[in-house]
C-alpha cells in the first residue's frame, strides 16, 4: 500500500470543520502546510474539538523573545510580575470571536483588558489590588479634544504655580484645612517622606478629587500614583529601603505635572488604536463568591466567552508591599490588602502556611471562573511553580486536578520558556526558568435559549421574517411562546450565530446570561431594555440626512440574513439612494457597491460611509475643532462669491441675504478641512439644514415657497446642533464597536445609470462578481427626488437649473414626463 493510500481523513472520525485539513498517518496527526495557526477564528465550531485547539496553540512560539512588550500604554505605570501582552493577544484571537467577552480575574495592570479591546472584544478585568482598577482604567482611555484641553490646562497651571516657592507656600497654607485629611496615616511617615513632599502630595490629592471630569481624574490619579515613590525616600521601585534626601518646595508638584504630561502623551498615541472602545475594571476578592445571576454582580454567571489570566506565583511576589506607599496615598490600607493577597510571600511567612493554603484559595477562584464561563468556552492560566521550605510544587498539575474536580475539562498544558533577565522581589520567582499555560474548558452542552423580541411592535411580515432569520442562520425552526418570544434548543457552540439576528434584541437561557444582539446594541447601546418603544432607523449615520422614499435599515439587515450571505461577500444596490443598503453592509461585515443618478444621493452615501473610515479619535478632534471655529461665523455679503456666479440670481431668490453670507462662510471654512471624508460629512450636514434656512416650505415634497418669507435664520445654531448630534452618534458607535461580531468592510457609491452596462464595467462590477443584490428601485412616477432637494443640489453641488431639469427627466421612475413623451 502506498503512503498516500494509508491516509485516513480525520473529518470522517471527528465532526469538526477544523479537521477538514487534517489527516491521520500512523496514529499521528499531521497538518497541511498552508494552514495558518495565527489566523483568528471566525466561528465557534472551529473550537469543537479540544485536541485540535491544543494542537493549534502548541504551534505558537510562546517565548516571544524578540517582541516589544511596552508598546502603547502597557507601561503607563510600574507593576511587578506582569505577563507580556503577546500572550493574551494570541489566546484571545485563537479562542474567541469579535465582540465576545474576555475576563481576567487576576487583572493586575490590565494587560489582558487592553489587548482584548484592541482585538475587537469586550473585557472585564478584576483584581484584589485596588490600584489595579486605577491603572487599568487609565491605560484604556480615549480622550476627546475637550478632555485633552482640560488636562493640558491643568498641567500648565501646575507648572506655572510650582515655579514660585512663595506661591506654593501661600497655596499650601491657604488650602491646608482642605487637603489635611488626604494625608494618610502612614506609620513613621516622616521617616519616608520629606515635609514638603507630604504637603504637596496632600495638596495634589485634594486637587485631583475636585476635578469634575472623570476621565481627567482617572489619568491624574494614575500619574499621582506613579509620582509617590519618586517623592518618597524609598530607594527604588523594587527595593524597600530608605534613602533620605532634600525635597525642594514645588518639586513634587512639578514631578506630578511631568508624569501627567507623559501619561497624556501615551494616551494620545493609544487613542488611534483604541478608538473610544472601553473595558470594565473591578476590585474583587476571588476567594469570595463574586459571580452570580444578578445585575448587581460585577461578573455574571454564564456570561464570559474566554478567561485569560496569570494568577500570582505562590509564595513569590508581594504586591501590597511593592505598592505600599501608593496605596496609602490613594486612600487604601495595604496592610488589609496584604492579609487577603493570594500567593503573597510575606503572608505565607506570617501565617506559617504552605502550598495547601494557596490551593484552597485558588479552588475558590476556579469556582468563580467556572461559574462565569459559558458552556464550551476556555480558561487559560499562565502559572509558575512554587517553592515552600525548599520543596518544589508543580502548580499547574495541582490546579489541573482542582479544576477537574470543579467540573472543568482538562485540555492540556504548554510549557513557556522565561527570559533570564525577568525580575522579581525574591529568589524563588527569580529562579523560574519556565511557566505553564494550563488550558481548561467548561464542557459543551445543548442549551434551551429564549430569543427576546424587540421593544417595539412588529408588523406581521416582520414577525414572519424574524422566525425565518432564525431558521436561516441557525438551521432550526423556533417555537413562539405566549409572550411573543421565540424558543429554540441549540448546541452551546452555535450561540454566536444568534448575535447576528435583526428582529431579536437579546438572547438568554438557563446556562446563558442575557445579552443584546448586535442590532440591539446599534439601536440602544448596552441596555437590555430600550427606553423607547419606537423603532430607531437613525443609528450610526443612517440619520445624517433626510431622504424621501428610503427603506429602513432593519429590513435591509434582515434580508441579508434570509439570503445567508457570508461576511466578506459583495452586495450590490443598483438604486442605492442615500446608502441604506451600503451602510448596513458595512455594519454587518459585507463589501458593497451602489449606483444612483441623483448626485445628492451619492453625496449623502459617501458621507455616511466614508466618515466611518476615519480614525474615530482623529475624526472627533477634527469635528471638535470645527465646532470651535463656528463661533466666528460671519454673514457678510462677500461670501456669496463662494458660489458660482451663474447661480447667484437663483440663490438670492431662495435665501435671505444674511443666510447667504453665513452659508457661504460655512462652506468656505469647510473647504479648508484637510480630510475629504470629514469635508463630505460637514457639507452633508449643511445640506440637511437647507430647507429650514431657505424660503422653501420645509414640509412640502415639491419645492414651494413659504407663505411668509423669512429675513434671517439661525444657520450656526442649526448646523452646530446637527453636528453635535452626529458627533455623539459616531462616538457612541465607536465606543461599542467591540461588541460587533463582524470585521467592517468597505462600501462604494458611484454616480451612474444602472440601465447602462458601462456603469457597471467602468466601476469594477463584472459578470459573476456580485454575491447578492438588495435594492428598492424608485416607485414609478411617485417621488420628485431632484425637485425635493433642488436647493441642496444647487447650493452644495453647484448644479444649475437646466442641468437639474435634464437629470430629473432622465431618472428611473421620474414624475417629470412631458406630454409629448406620454
Image (cartoon, rainbow, N blue to C red):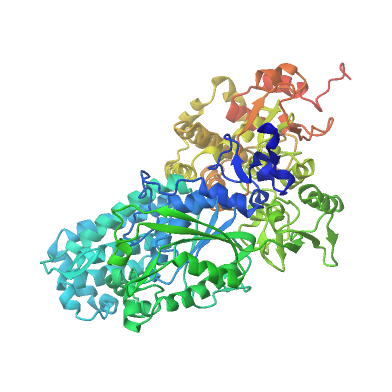
The quadrant in which residue 530 appears is: bottom right
Coordinates of residue 666 in the picture (x, y in percent) = 49, 36
Quadrant in which the C terminus is drawn? top right
Q: Is residue 462 left or right of residue 125?
A: right
Can residue 510 be seen at all in this image of the molecule? yes
Nearer the observer, 506 or 234: 234
Coordinates of residue 745 in the picture (x, y in percent) = 61, 37
Coordinates of residue 380 in the picture (x, y in percent) = 52, 59
Q: Is residue 553 left or right of residue 692?
A: right
Nearer the observer, 733 or 104: 104
For this orientation, the residue located farthest to the front is: 1
Which residue is depicted at the point 85% across and 67% down?
482
For this orientation, the residue located farthest to the right is: 822
The quadrant in which residue 401 appears is: bottom right
The total number of labels drawn is 0
Q: Is residue 611 left or right of residue 197?
A: right
Which residue is depicted at the point 51% across and 39% down?
614
Amino acid at each position: 500500500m502506498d503512503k498516500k493510500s494509508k491516509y485516513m481523513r480525520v473529518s470522517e472520525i471527528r465532526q469538526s470543520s477544523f479537521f477538514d485539513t487534517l489527516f491521520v498517518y500512523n496514529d499521528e496527526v499531521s497538518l497541511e502546510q498552508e494552514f495558518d495557526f495565527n489566523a483568528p477564528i471566525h466561528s465557534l465550531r472551529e473550537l469543537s474539538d479540544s485536541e485540535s485547539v491544543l494542537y493549534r496553540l502548541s504551534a505558537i512560539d510562546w517565548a516571544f523573545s524578540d517582541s516589544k512588550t511596552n508598546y502603547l500604554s502597557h507601561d503607563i505605570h510600574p507593576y511587578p510580575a506582569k505577563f507580556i501582552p503577546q500572550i493574551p493577544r494570541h489566546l484571545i484571537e485563537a479562542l474567541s470571536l469579535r465582540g465576545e467577552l474576555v475576563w481576567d480575574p487576576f487583572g493586575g495592570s490590565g494587560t489582558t483588558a487592553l489587548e482584548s479591546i484592541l482585538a475587537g472584544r469586550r473585557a472585564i478585568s478584576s483584581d484584589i489590588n485596588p490600584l489595579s482598577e486605577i491603572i487599568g482604567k487609565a491605560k484604556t482611555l480615549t480622550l476627546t479634544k475637550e478632555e485633552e484641553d482640560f488636562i493640558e490646562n491643568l498641567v500648565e497651571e501646575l507648572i506655572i504655580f510650582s515655579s514660585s516657592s512663595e506661591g506654593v507656600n501661600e497655596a499650601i497654607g491657604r488650602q491646608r484645612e482642605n487637603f489635611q485629611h488626604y494625608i494618610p496615616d502612614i506609620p513613621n511617615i516622616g521617616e519616608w517622606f520629606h515635609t514638603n513632599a507630604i504637603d504637596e502630595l496632600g495638596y495634589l490629592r485634594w486637587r485631583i478629587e475636585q476635578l469634575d471630569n472623570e476621565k481627567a481624574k482617572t489619568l491624574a490619579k494614575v500619574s499621582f500614583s506613579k509620582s509617590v515613590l519618586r517623592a518618597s525616600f524609598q530607594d527604588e521601585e523594587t527595593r524597600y529601603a530608605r534613602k533620605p534626601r532634600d525635597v525642594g518646595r514645588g518639586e513634587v508638584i512639578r514631578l506630578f505635572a511631568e508624569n501627567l504630561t507623559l501619561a497624556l502623551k501615551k494616551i494620545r498615541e493609544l487613542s488611534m488604536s483604541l478608538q473610544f472602545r472601553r473595558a470594565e475594571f473591578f476590585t474583587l476578592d476571588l476567594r469570595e463568591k463574586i459571580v452570580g445571576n444578578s445585575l448587581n454582580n460585577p461578573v455574571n454567571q454564564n456570561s464570559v466567552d474566554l478567561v485569560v489570566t496569570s494568577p500570582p506565583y505562590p509564595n513569590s511576589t508581594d504586591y501590597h508591599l511593592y505598592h505600599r506607599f501608593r496605596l496609602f496615598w490613594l486612600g487604601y490600607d495595604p496592610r488589609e490588602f496584604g492579609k487577603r493577597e493570594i500567593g503573597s510571600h510575606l503572608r505565607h511567612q506570617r501565617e506559617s502556611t504552605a502550598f495547601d493554603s494557596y490551593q484552597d484559595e485558588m479552588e475558590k477562584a476556579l469556582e468563580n471562573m467556572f461559574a462565569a464561563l459559558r458552556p464550551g468556552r476556555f480558561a487559560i492560566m499562565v502559572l509558575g511553580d512554587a517553592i515552600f521550605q525548599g520543596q518544589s510544587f508543580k502548580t499547574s498539575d495541582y490546579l489541573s486536578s482542582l479544576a477537574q474536580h470543579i467540573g472543568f475539562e482538562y485540555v492540556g498544558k504548554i510549557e513557556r520558556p522565561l527570559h533570564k533577565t525577568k525580575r522579581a522581589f525574591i529568589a524563588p520567582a527569580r529562579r523560574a526558568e519556565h511557566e505553564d499555560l494550563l488550558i481548561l474548558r467548561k464542557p459543551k452542552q445543548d442549551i434551551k435559549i429564549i430569543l427576546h423580541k424587540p421593544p417595539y411592535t412588529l408588523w406581521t411580515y416582520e414577525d414572519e421574517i424574524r422566525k425565518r432569520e432564525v431558521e436561516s442562520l441557525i438551521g432550526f425552526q423556533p417555537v413562539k411562546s405566549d409572550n411573543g418570544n421565540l424558543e429554540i434548543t441549540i448546541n452551546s457552540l452555535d450561540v454566536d450565530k444568534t448575535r447576528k439576528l435583526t428582529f431579536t434584541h437579546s438572547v438568554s437561557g438557563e446556562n446563558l446570561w442575557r445579552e443584546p444582539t448586535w442590532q440591539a446594541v446599534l439601536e440602544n447601546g448596552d441596555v437590555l431594555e430600550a427606553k423607547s418603544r419606537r423603532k430607531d432607523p437613525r443609528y450610526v449615520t443612517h440619520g445624517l440626512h433626510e431622504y424621501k422614499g428610503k427603506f429602513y435599515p432593519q429590513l435591509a439587515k434582515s434580508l441579508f440574513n434570509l439570503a445567508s450571505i457570508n461576511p466578506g461577500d459583495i452586495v450590490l444596490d443598483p438604486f442605492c439612494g442615500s446608502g441604506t443598503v451600503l451602510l448596513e453592509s458595512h455594519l454587518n461585515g459585507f463589501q458593497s457597491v451602489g449606483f444612483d443618478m441623483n448626485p445628492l444621493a451619492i453625496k449623502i452615501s459617501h458621507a455616511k460611509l466614508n466618515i466611518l473610515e476615519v480614525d474615530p479619535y482623529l475624526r472627533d478632534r477634527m469635528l471638535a475643532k470645527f465646532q470651535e471655529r463656528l463661533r466666528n461665523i460671519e454673514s457678510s455679503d462677500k461670501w456669496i462669491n463662494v458660489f458660482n456666479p451663474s447661480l447667484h440670481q437663483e440663490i438670492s431668490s431662495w435665501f435671505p441675504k444674511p443666510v447667504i453670507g453665513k452659508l457661504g462662510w460655512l462652506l468656505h471654512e469647510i473647504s479648508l478641512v484637510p480630510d475629504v471624508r470629514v469635508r463630505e460629512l460637514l457639507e452633508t450636514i449643511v445640506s440637511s439644514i437647507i430647507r429650514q434656512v431657505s424660503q422653501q416650505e420645509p414640509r412640502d415634497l415639491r419645492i414651494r415657497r413659504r407663505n411668509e418669507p423669512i429675513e434671517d435664520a439661525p444657520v450656526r445654531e442649526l448646523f452646530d446642533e446637527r453636528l453635535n448630534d452626529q458627533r455623539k452618534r459616531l462616538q457612541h458607535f465607536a465606543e461599542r464597536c467591540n461588541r460587533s461580531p463582524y470585521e467592517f468592510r468597505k462600501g462604494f457609491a458611484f454616480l451612474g445609470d444602472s440601465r447602462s452596462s458601462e456603469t457597471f464595467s467602468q466601476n469594477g462590477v463584472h459578470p459573476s462578481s456580485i454575491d447578492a443584490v438588495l435594492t428598492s428601485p424608485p416607485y414609478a412616477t411617485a417621488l420628485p427626488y431632484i425637485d425635493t432637494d433642488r436647493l441642496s443640489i444647487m447650493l452644495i453641488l453647484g448644479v444649475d437649473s437646466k442641468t437639474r431639469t435634464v437629470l430629473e427627466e432622465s431618472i428611473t421612475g421620474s414624475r417629470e414626463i412631458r406630454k409629448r413623451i406620454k
